[in-house]
Image: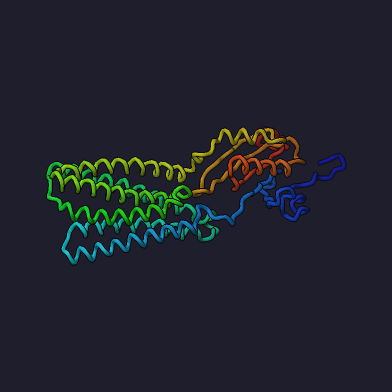
Amino acid sequence: MDQKGKAPMSWRWRRERNGGSDPLTGYPWSMSGGHSHSHGHAHGHSHPHGGGNANRRRLAWACALAVIYMLAELFGGLYTGSLALLADAGHMLSDAAALLLSLFAIWICQRPPTPRRTWGYHRTEILAALANGATLVGISVYVLVEAVHRFQHPSQVQAPLMMGIAVGGLVVNLISLRILSGGKSESLNVRGAWLHVLTDALGSVQAIAAGALIWAFGWSWADPVASILISLLVIYSAWDLLRETLGVLMEGAPGHIDVGEVRDALAGVSGVLEVHDLHVWTITSGMESLSAHVVVEDEAMACTVLGRVRTTLHDRFGIDHLTIQVEPVAFAEHGCHV
């Protein structure tokens, strides 16, 4: 109470006076539990996360190419009786399935949030990337086991047919890699699909090289050796994808953001005395979120300080989805009861 026995102007009154918005930033105020603090939500929901429309087109084209070549191999294998063609058709089917999974994830993540799923379906892209990464590791382990088996029990390989199939697959995969390359740095989901196609492209290169060595010199061991090298490379690449996707699902700090640097930047904002309960995490590729409590020197300047905090986080770290709790020094959370 002030000297005249009147309660001080509340945040609710200030919010209503300003039409429900922060007069400095234009973003809405929100209340929580009746305490003297506010949450500034400085996030624009209109921008696409992970280039959804462009990535959907990329995945659709790559998937169409995989399906077309798969059907060509399937009918060719049935017509010629070639087991190699039928086997490679099955391989292309796995690629098409991986691309369809990524495409489905992009489609479903654009569904609007619901009262039960307040973040919407953005994490579906991360789950698709995780599934593709795990599948790549599983396939590579299987190829390693088969390569060891080939060393123990060599088999006859029809090198010319093997090379012909591999060349066709390589052309299709190179086109798909070119299509997907524009989105692999924006989205873990697209990156997972890109790695799947890259694995197939490397397998085609391995098949061409091994087929040439077998045809020219009769080196039957070239096929399993090349398979082992490619599998190890794929496991290395997929492991990095798995590490990043699991980091997102465990709500770890984004790799490109130094939380200590963020804390120092917030503490350096004029009017901020202390920063605590700072959390930075990723919802999906390109959508980072931050929540923090900032203690202000002058409660009357809270609105101005909130605008400075928002500008600092946007300009220095590119973080726009914010939940900032502004607290006066006398707030009970700091050991002083009012």
**Left or right of 76: which side holds 325?**
right
Q: Residue at x 49, y 39 (%)?
A: 255
**Left or right of 33: which side holds 98?**
left
Q: Residue at x 26, y 54 (%)?
A: 167
How far across and how far down the image is residue 201, in percent?
31, 50
Camera-nearest residue between 177 and 27: 177
How far across and how far down the image is residue 84, in percent?
19, 56
Classify 289 as above or below 54. Answer: above
**Left or right of 335: which side holds 213?**
left
Classify 80 as above or below 291. Answer: below
Q: Residue at x 58, y 34 (%)?
A: 261
Quarter of the image where the C terminus is located: top right
How far across and how far down the image is residue 107, in percent?
46, 60
Picture mark count: 0
Q: Is residue 281 visible?
A: yes
Quarter of the image where the N terminus is located: top right
Q: Residue at x 71, y 35 (%)?
A: 270
Farthest residue to the front: give it: 216
Q: Is residue 126 visible?
A: no
How far across and how far down the image is residue 157, in percent?
15, 51
Classify 147 as above or below 174. Answer: above
Tell me, what colour scheme is on the image?
rainbow
Farthest residue to the right: give it: 4
